[in-house]
Amino acid sequence: MKQKKPKWVVQKERDRRAAAAETVWLFGIHAVRDALANPMRERMRLVVTKNAADRLAEEIAASGMEPELSDARKFTAPIDPQSVHQGAALEVKPLDWGSLSDICAPRGQPARVILLDRVTDPHNVGAILRSAEVFGARAVIAPHRHSAPETGALAKTASGALERQPYLRVKNLATTMGALREMGYTLLGLDGEAEESLRDAIPQPGGPIALVLGAEGPGLRDKTKETCDKLVRIDASGSFGSLNVSNAAAVSLYEVQAKS
């Protein structure tokens, strides 16, 4: 008699199959162009208007995809009708960037990582990915739960950075922070109430640094704060010292680069 699998094993297998079957619709000329040019992308379906097809002709030809032409007045891709799609939508599988150690191991080089604690707005995460790419961060890391998944809105805000900048979703943020510490990273948590400034806290000579940012309003959770090596603030010249989380990420990355 065949032994039945435990319920947790069955559920795990179902979750794995569901994840493998998951697809994302990217939209907008920039997001679609960069996804077409990304050899790491598994592409499924491309819907374009005549105008978008002309603008993307080179990338479409190189990708080998057969586009579906759609009327601009009745765009047939299954995306939110309010999306600013610019006549281009591409169905893809989420990117697999590999393991934390593969992406983030310093290997004797200056290394920067951004960790996001419950930052759920895809527009903020997209903007952070752009800044991370500009300043050469190894990865932007967020937990699977209570974070922005890879979506068309995130990809459009990232303006192509999603295809080039690793965005790692992890099971447990605190555990990941511990793994980064073992790699040699100093974990600096951004907190508006912290006594020490980020500029003063950056170690000299510059070693691997992980910047940890929380959601606007709640900020970092207590567990995340406890796991950081230091809590730091961004210096402000006025009494109003609060920044949007994507702006805070950009300023922090610049500070680290300038001090290193």
Image (tube, helix red, strand yellow):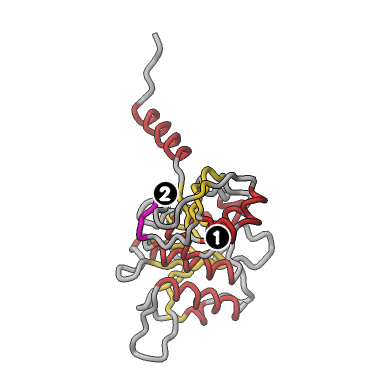
Closer to the camera in the image, 47 or 208: 47
Q: Is residue 39 above or below residue 205?
A: above
State the residue position of label 2. Answer: 76
Q: Residue at x 39, y 52 (%)?
A: 79
Q: Position of residue 17 (x, y in %)?
A: 44, 34
Magenta stretch, overall SS: loop
Answer with mark 2 or mark 1, whichever residue precedes in sequence: 2
Q: Position of residue 12 (x, y in %)?
A: 40, 34
Q: Position of residue 124 (x, y in %)?
A: 42, 67
Q: Is residue 203 above or below residue 25?
A: below
Q: Residue at x 36, y 31 (%)?
A: 8
| Distance (Cα) linking label 2 and label 1 | 34 Å
Q: Quadrant of the N terminus?
A: top left
Q: Residue at x 36, y 55 (%)?
A: 80
Q: Is residue 81 magenta?
A: yes
The crowding category of the residue bearing disc 1, from other C-alpha atoms within 10 Å (few below 14, some 14 to 19, many at least 20), is: many
Which span of residues is magenta-colored? 78-82
Q: Is residue 159 above or below residue 47?
A: below
Q: Quadrant of the C terminus?
A: bottom right
What label does residue 139 carry, if any? 1
